[in-house]
Amino acid sequence: MRKIAIVSEHASPLAQAGGVDSGGQNVYVAQIARRLAAMGMQIDVFTRLDNPYLPSEMEWGQNVRIVHVPAGPARSLPKEALLPYMDDFSVYMNRYFGAGDAYDLIHANFFMSAMAALPVARRAGIPLAVTFHALGRVRRRHQAEADLFPDARFDIEDDIVRHADRIIAECPQDKKDLIDLYQADPQRIGMIPCGFDEQEMWPMDRATARAGLGWEPGAFYLLQLGRMVPRKGVDNVIRALAHLRKRRTVDARLCIVGGNTRDPLDATTPELARLRAIAQEEGVQDHVEFAGRRARHQLRQYYCAADAFVTTPWYEPFGITPVEAMACARPVVGSDTGGIRYTVVDGETGFLVPPREPVLLADKLEILARDGALATRMGAAGLRRAKKLFTWDRVGLELAREFDELTGQKGISWPIRELSEGQGLPA
């Protein structure tokens, strides 16, 4: 049985997405672990111990084990504070590798995971594949002084790019940035997107979904779903809502799902206080619902209840939520940046708009509000595109082929076993 070590230092598959440091990478790691295991591989996920009550090891479904690495205090910390503990993470991994069965390959997620994994892979004589999920130079360009990672990140990433056996880019822009900003060898880059789970996301009747949430039947609802951090551009969506309402042509409402806790408390999610103030300033506080964090099994109802999904981050390495919205047959209006530029086909599955341009965003949303038939066609086109290109089964299969090539076992025909009920992701 092929044995793969997946390293994800700050993003545990156990975490519920939606918090400041819990988002797409958590979902990605959880899903690829499940998919690779369903093909018959043994998967160990190495993630930092951030809770003293968690076991050192735990079985997480068939062929998947989670290893909690003691590196730094056993409590939740911002990912920007974890860099000093990566040597401890690496030492623990190296000792763990020496005490058990040999691994065939390491797949590191994020630059700190790759930093910890690189010396371990070299000592073990096995390939290292890396998915960055975000690049430091791109982040600094967009976040400037709000980027709390030290400049040392750039040299670390340069070293990883030079020495990793394979880099997995998540979209064409990611690949271009690796080549242009890091001088990565194009021959050592594979491009594999993120995906959606067909057992989690599929269309349902809008009226039924809306009734279950207590939404107004005839209003035009926008949905924003994801982490509550400034770079996600939720303030831009609130301002666009205000422009829509000032035109008095659309009874527009906005639901914002996300936060560090189920209850949308400013004390636990400081970004919410800023967003509430903007809604008050724009005069739309009565038309914005802050729903707080929701479990994975609840998200489909929100996607399907909305008329349009909106996501306008300053930058986005990939962005799983637009794909999930497409899988629920909803048109997506998103930033013309990064992975969203790849997943959303402008004018076909939704619209692309510049970040931080609320008037232009409002213009596109008004088109969808006025032309329900167009919105329906775009939703159907998005569903077709999502099912063709962005399922986690497809992502897992493409990763398996990359790993086969790295380990010299090309040509294997991987069976994809259906995940049985109860083997999917926990709620």
Image (tube, rainbow, N blue to C red):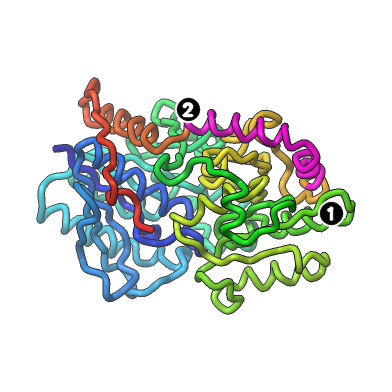
Q: Is residue 344 visible?
A: yes
| Left or right, 80 with reference to 373 | left
Q: Amino acid at mark 1?
A: His
Which residue sits at x=32%, y=55%? 116
Q: Is residue 138 visible?
A: no
Which residue sits at x=73%, y=50%? 220
Nearer to me, 64 or 122: 64
Q: Position of residue 305 (x, y in %)?
A: 61, 50
Q: Position of residue 310 (x, y in %)?
A: 66, 48
Q: Position of residue 374 (x, y in %)?
A: 72, 32
Marks 1 and 2 close (CB-CB < 8 Å): no
Q: Is residue 356 magenta?
A: no
Q: Amino acid at mark 2?
A: Lys
| C-alpha distance separating marks 1 and 2 | 36 Å
| Crowd tier of the residue under label 1, counting other residues whose Cα lies within 10 Å: few below 14, some 14–19, many 20 or above | many
Which quadrant of the figure contains the N terminus?
Answer: top left
| Crowd tier of the residue under label 2, counting other residues whose Cα lies within 10 Å: few below 14, some 14–19, many 20 or above | few
Placement of 217 over or under 364, stated as above or below: below
Which residue sits at x=67%, y=29%? 348
Residue 243 is tagged as 1
Which residue sits at x=28%, y=33%? 403
Q: Is residue 375 magenta?
A: yes
For disc 2, the marked residue is 388
Which quadrant of the figure contains the C terminus?
Answer: bottom left
Q: What is the span of residues highlighted in magenta in the rendered image?
A: 362-389
Dividing the picture into quadrants, the one containing residue 124 is: top left
